[in-house]
Amino acid sequence: MTSLHVGTLDQPTAGGRSRPGEPLLEVAGLCADYGIGPDAVHAVLDADLVLHRGEVLGLAGESGSGKSTFAYAATRLLRAPGVITGGSVRFHLGQGRDIDLLAADESQLRRLRWAHVAVVLQSAMNALNPVFSVGDQLGDVLQAHRPDMDRAARRDRAVQLLDMVGITADRLRSYPHELSGGMRQRVMIAMALALEPQMVIMDEPTTALDVVTQREILEELAALRDRLGFAVLFITHDLSLLIEIADSIAIMYGGRIVERARATALFRAPRHPYTLGLLGSFPSLHGSRVHMTGIAGSPPDLRNPPAGCPFHPRCRYVMDRCRTELPPLRPVARADVQNPRVAACWLQDGSAPPPAELARPEPGPGPEPAPDPGLAVGTNRPTAGTGGTVADTGTDTTGGAA
Amino acid sequence: MTAPGAAPALPVTGTPVLEARSLVKHFPVHRRGRRTQRGAVVHAVDDVSIAVPEASITAVVGESGCGKSTLTRMLARLIRPTAGELVLNGSPAARPDAREYAGQVQMVLQDPFASLNLVHTVRYHLARPLRIHGLGPDGNSLDDEITSLLKRVALSPQDADKYPHELSGGQRQRVAIARALAVRPRVLLADEPVSMLDVSIRLGVLNLLADLRERERLAIVYVTHDIASARYLGDTIAVMYAGQIIERGPAATVTDQPSHPYTQLLLAAAPDPDRPSPPTLRGRGAPPSLVSPPAGCRFHPRCPYAMAVCARQAPPSIEVASGHVSACWLHAKDADPDTPRNPDPVPGSIPLTMASQQDSRPPRGEST
């Protein structure tokens, strides 16, 4: 672990595919507020998260749960009035070098951003500059970060990048308004990947798109991830989508991470009542139509958060302790070593057996990670024969037919 | 095309309260500085017929630009159809009686943050339609009416004196629904009523609509892009593509045995955590330009099963099962002889659909 010199950031990382599975971004105890002083709103509280190389980590939660604030704080992209008030963030560049992002100065950040950490925003229309053509904007990135490239090389690279996301070279001269929503989002992805970053933050990248376009873009993204090996921090409110595309998922509620698990484990065997409620908020596409209830109440007002567990006013399993004591995010008492599960809930502290819905058996570990590290981690899903539970939609099946 | 005369009867649970017959809406195109055809129009809605029976929910599903909102606006008579007619309670709705029509057909909009007036209380929002429609009693009984409206949407009477900013998104949408109910309508048009709400509170609003269908025997049109919620809430699902209804039938049937290739595509693309492996999309691409829609079936340029006839002639609505109609030549009896027909599976289609996935799920647990 050497201290980082500005120069080391400029060294290209070998294809970005050094040893998948190693930690890439380690966040511990991160806190972020909006505003300062006694009126500050605590948007992110004591959040721990590790993003591994080549992994798709989903961050799910409702609006105001702090998921975007977390991602922007962790990468120092948070703008005033957002303030990072505590915690540590380490970004591993590979070969034993790492960087303390919260201590990094502007010039270090400038070299880190885009080259190592890139962002794809929800609203491509606002993220792209309306008065420059797509080619100009791609060239601009390359000119700033790859000063050794000449004009022709930049153009070739821009063509190559657009080709990567399925856009023909004649679109280089197009302006953002001339592209469809899906194409704009593809341009955003091409731009994010221009410098072969090791990590891409995707903040609701497909929320504004139609389902067919969304699916096409997610397919392309999965193929690119397999080829280039970058890690993705995928932020969305759509948990049902996340379960399909993410390797592991962290659920945020009221500024805190309340549960973290592999995607299939979270889906088949949630441990936090909020996760259970969220899973029960998405009507299924199969089976008999059953009455579902969602979650009673509303998300907390962060200006005036509830005492104790932030979820307790809406929780149907609430106990006295929940109203006064904040449950820490810690390993679930019965979790096995292979699949570390953490949840912030007093029901899971081992003192009493949790309700059956929150104690479903873990699904099998799934196929072992493929021997070829370049293969899709996304294929790490349960298939026939991996045991565990018989498919349970994870929805609340109590109550009469709808 | 949905030929109203030939179209088989809908799965009707009651008499249609509101019926649209062959509605057409063409928006003129005005473009400066470019070569444009004189008289070019956007074919936003073309020949759509829909009947909304009492005490039922009709879900209209489609992607953005398919014309579902234009259809809703015509049903609400906010815009005038280019052609076609609206039939309310069995008699054609004539133009002049706009207020009377609004007393029967009310609308709930997508964004409750924009559809309520920030400077007025909930009470004002609920009293206004009562006054305008001459339903408002005075004094205490107005309060009673407002209290009863709030109770019907599961809000508390104390909420009457709150301002929209004091309410959560779900509560605001309930106020918007209460406002629509104030004039005691028979038809409620809900255009994406939950897409702006947080995931955990969407079901609360959907369940409220389901309750209103039962309790008040309302005919509800639920417009959405989310086919899973349409399956959850709808009695009937109508799928729209490029300005036309391409499939219609009982909600569970349309989603479990989709008969139109576009419905199959929509279902394959929809998020589904139960899916054992990534879906295969058949019919990639984007909807056509509605200024010059393709001849024949509007889906044929993308359709994986397109035949010669699809490019020549628009498919009629064909009944594939009782109450389940599909505008697709694959289901025609006299289509090309080598074409598979219903009930034979459309080639490659059934693996996309739900039936086979359900088959593939149980072995996961058994073969441990």
Image (cartoon, helix red, strand yellow):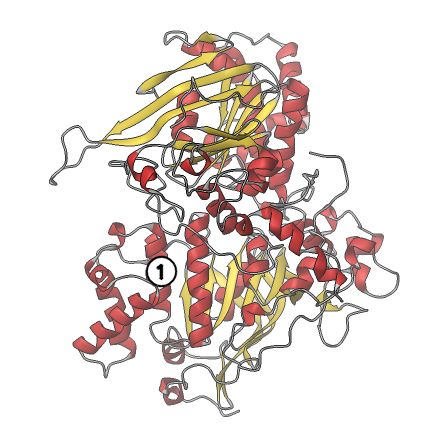
A391 to the left or right of A160:
right
Where residue A90 appears, x then y in whole percent? Answer: 53, 79
Establish if B294 lies above or below A237: above
Q: Chain of mark 1?
A: A
Residue lying at the far right in this picture: please name it.
A352
Tag 1: residue type?
Answer: Arg
Where residue B28 appears, x then y in whole percent? Answer: 23, 28
Q: Which residue is at the front of the view, A65 or B34?
A: B34
> Mark 1 highlights which residue?
A186
Residue lying at the far bottom in this picture: please name it.
A2
Q: Residue at x 68, y 21 (%)?
A: B215
Q: Which residue is at the front of the view, A2 or B249?
A: B249
Q: Which residue is at the front of the view, A57 or B256?
A: B256
Establish if A58 lies above or below B311: below
**Image quarter hosting the C terminus of chain A:** top right
Q: Which residue is at the front of the view, A13 or A68?
A: A13
B224 to the left or right of B67:
right
Disc count in the image? Answer: 1
Q: Residue at x 21, y 32 (%)?
A: B29
Q: Badge 1, how many Cα within 10 Å: few under 14, some, many 20+?
A: many
Task: Using the rendered view, name the quadrant where residue B41 is placed.
Answer: top left
Task: Using the rendered view, name the quadrant where residue B168 is placed.
Answer: top right
Element under disc 1: helix
Where residue B287 appears, x then y in whole percent? Answer: 35, 43
Q: Residue at x 62, y 37 (%)?
A: B232
| Residue B205 is at least partly visible in this image | no
Where residue B7 appears, x then y in whole percent? Answer: 46, 22
